[in-house]
Image (cartoon, coloured by chain):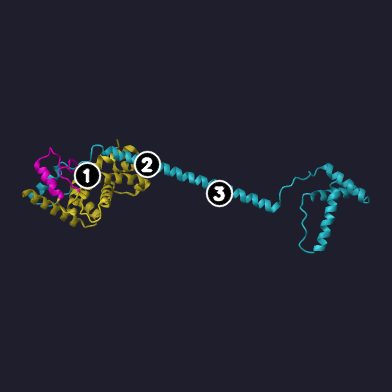
Amino acid sequence: MERLDLPPDLQQMERRLSSRQGAAPAADHRDRVLAAVRGERAQRRVSLWQRGGAWQVAAVAAAVAVLWVNVAVRTVGEGWAIPTEATNGRTVRKTAEAIRSIVPQLTEREALREALLLRAGVAVTAVPRSAGAARDASSLAHWKEVRSWVSQ
Amino acid sequence: MIRGSPDDLLDGLVAGEDRAFAALYDRHGAAMFRVAVAILGSPEEAEDAVQDVFISLVRLGTGLRAVRNLKAYLFASVRRAATKRLPTGRPAGLLGADPADPRTGAAPAESAMGARLQRALACLPAEQREIVALHVDAGLTFAACADMLGVSPNTAASRYRYALAKLRDALKE
């Protein structure tokens, strides 16, 4: 304790104060305080876990949203996935034979090339062009006709 | 048992070690209680104020690292917690104080002079009772007390001197 320049009677008073039996908390106060400290720590741990859990839920929700957007964009961009015939060598050859039966003057190589082009267009959705409605309608009709005999 | 420096104790408190909180209570708990009693007068309220401080230490967590003087911080905290518990308009420590309650320091086995001293302390103005508790019971320097009370060290020392004089006069009567 700092020493003040006190007269003797006040010095004696100070000594009496220092040596007095000071106030003391109840005997179980220490235990109660430490139990409260433990309780508070446990509560904080739970609270932190809950906050972590909330972040996990948020992360899952964000992932689901990203997935949904991704699927939606793919659906809009590519159309529904409709199973189509596989473009293998046998179907291409059959198509080329069909072409040559209609246009016999085509060489075998040219018929195969046309068949490949036609088979490549099987999975393409037929959409009318935005300009020239009459021509588009005829084009569509022509396209449907071609598809019908190519698929035979 | 943590026996190291205040820094070791602080590290333990930040880490949330039970033994650090126990060591802190063993070192300063009784003095914190005495300061709280000096402000509140009620031992029950004083015990709750001390508990509030310990809980606030847990809540502070790593923020405790910013504390430079743990002892001064503790007593500033207990003073704040005790003041918060004072009902509005109530003079600090004058109501609810029972000098006969052993928890206020006047044990039945203590001398009649001790009981008179305790009563005289309870009758001091709040600011003088507070400086006695902070300087004598908590062992804080006048500079630390002044910092806590928002006054100059000279004012803190003067309050203490006046308190001693009043106690002396009360015991002469």
Q: Residue at x 51, y 45 (%)?
A: A56
State left or right for residue A17 relative to residue A103.
left
Amino acid, disc 3: Ala
Residue A15 in sight in this render: no
CA gap between label 3 and label 2 equals 31 Å
Q: Which colour is chain A painted? A: cyan
Q: Is residue B121 magenta?
A: yes
Amino acid, disc 2: Arg
User: Where B84 sits versus B4, above or below?
Assistant: below
Q: Which residues are magenta?
A: B96-122
> Label 2: chain?
A
Residue A47 in sight in this render: yes
Q: Residue furthest top?
A: B1
Residue located beneath label 3 in the image: A62
Residue A25 rendering spot, x and y as whole percentages: 22, 41
Neighbour tally class for label 3: few under 14, some 14-19, many 20 plus, Cα within 10 Å:
few
Residue located beneath label 2 in the image: A41
Q: Which chain is yellow?
A: B
Give me the disc on residue B43. 1
Q: Residue at x 23, y 47 (%)?
A: B36
Q: Residue at x 11, y 50 (%)?
A: B167
> Label 3: chain?
A
Residue B101 rendering spot, x and y as whole percentages: 17, 42
CA gap between label 3 and label 1 equals 54 Å
Residue A39 sits in quarter: top left
